[in-house]
Image (cartoon, helix red, strand yellow):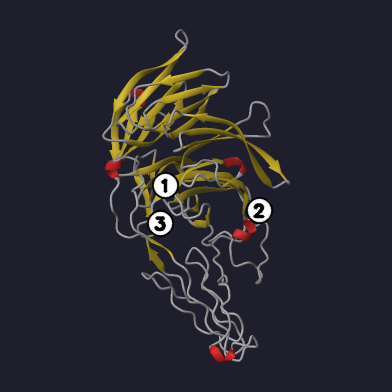
Amino acid sequence: MAYRSGGRRGGRGRGGGDFYRGRGRGGGYQQDGYYQDGYDDPQYQHHQPPVLQPARGGRGGQSYYNGRGGAYEPFGRGGRGGKRNAGDTDGMADHGGGPRRRGGQGGGNPLVYCRHFMDGTCQARSSPCGFKHGLLRLGGMPKAHSNGIDAMLIQENPEDSTKPILWTGSRDGKLKMWEMVEQDGSRLQFREKQDTNMQGCNVTSLLYAGDGVFVGQSNGVITCFRLNGQTFTLTGHTAPVYALLMLDDVLISGSWDATVRFWKFDAASQQFGCVQSVPVCSGVKAIANHTTQLWVATIEKIQVLDLSNNGTIGAGFDVPKVMDLLLYSGPSGSFMLAVTLSGHIKAFNLQTGAEEYDQQHSGPQQKIMKLAGLKDPSDGQDLLLFAKDNGWITALELPTMNERGSFRAHNEVEVRSMVSIPALGLLFTAGMDGSVAAWKFVPGGTPPCKAGGAPAW
């Protein structure tokens, strides 16, 4: 089926003919207007060309029975049903037909996860369902926060290992702790256990290490909440702290002030102190480490610090506006995966230092915000997940980079935070509308398109 592009709505459907339902041809794209480029500093926000978003499908064609809408997401929502044909028994025959009917679902897409299967209600008219099975929505919170969520983490519950803890940090200046309880055997219920006011500062990053939760804030302060009730404040950064990492007994932080700081806990003073500050070329968005290398994603490029040589800045890569970094080790070796604001996913060989994969995985003018990795329990497949600014998440198979499937996690809002429990196939996502959702990959999915094949690098 063909789809229009560039218009605000797809074309009008053709009639089904005879006694069959009309079908909308719709789809197409509609224009947005302004958007930010994913970085929070106002100097990097600018006007962009119109954003192309999925539009509504065309109106169903005229037929003796109900008109049917256009194809379903992500190519466009189903359109309005068409008018009934003249001669219908609803008394409107002499006035151009009967009432319009609700738009229907198209023929499906094997690379889009079925939203009805997610909720356990799939009753496909055709057999099998035209959409992909294998993903459940375990639950969520439509309003966990009153503003966007930039950071999440999972912590094992020291009191009950069967009830893991989820921490969420938001632009509403709140840090919240949630206990997750299994309900009805396949759903999760979130119970708020703690609500901490961060003195009006946005929470920009979270890390659980040792016996404490480290909270990066928009004013450059890092606060540590220990399980024993102690609180520590780490000061030194002068701009938002977007990245936190614990390496051995050293806390590493990356900030928008273009520095990477190293902190150690002093037992005598019972305080954290900064033992080193390394200036980098520009604001830091993400950090990750492999052996003695510390990868630092900045606005301008990726820089690599040699931790065995006092943090000396070594070779780097001219890749601007990297949103996230993720270490992957598989049968082809160890790779650092990076995603850029423009939607490019890159793989760097950590043995050779070479860039071995570069592919754009988003549509025109779409942004990719976050990466996460997990293992699909149904077949043991390693997956790379990336979140877009329209609420959609796509899963790629590693190391082939074949697409396994996509789903809409949040309704047309940026997903800036994802955390996973890889071995269990669990994924938690958070939107800029303050919502949180939990997902689980399960057996029963339809065979993925392009299954198997050689590694992508």
Estimate the x, y position of residue 65 in percent, counting from the top left.
61, 83
Hey, what amino acid is under mark 3? Ser
Q: Residue furthest toward the right? A: 184
Q: With 432 as the anchor, is 437 left or right in this view?
A: right
Q: Rounded to the nearest whole Å, what is the CA distance between mark 2 and mark 3?
A: 27 Å
Dots 2, 3 in contact, CB < 8 A: no
The kind of secondary structure element at disc 2 is loop
From the image, tell me which residue sits under label 2.
443
Hey, what amino acid is under mark 2? Pro
Q: Nearer the viewer, residue 199 or 398?
A: 199
Q: With 346 as the anchor, is 439 left or right in this view?
A: right
The local crowd at label 2, few if under 14, some if 14 to 19, many if 20 or more residues have their Cα within 10 Å, is few
Q: Residue furthest toward the top? A: 268
From the image, tell me which residue sits under label 3.
362
Which residue is drawn at the image coordinates 29% and 38% (left, top)? Answer: 316
Q: Which circle marks residue 369 in the picture?
A: 1
Q: Nearer the viewer, residue 326 or 196?
A: 196
Hey, what amino acid is under mark 1? Met
Residue 112 in sight here: yes
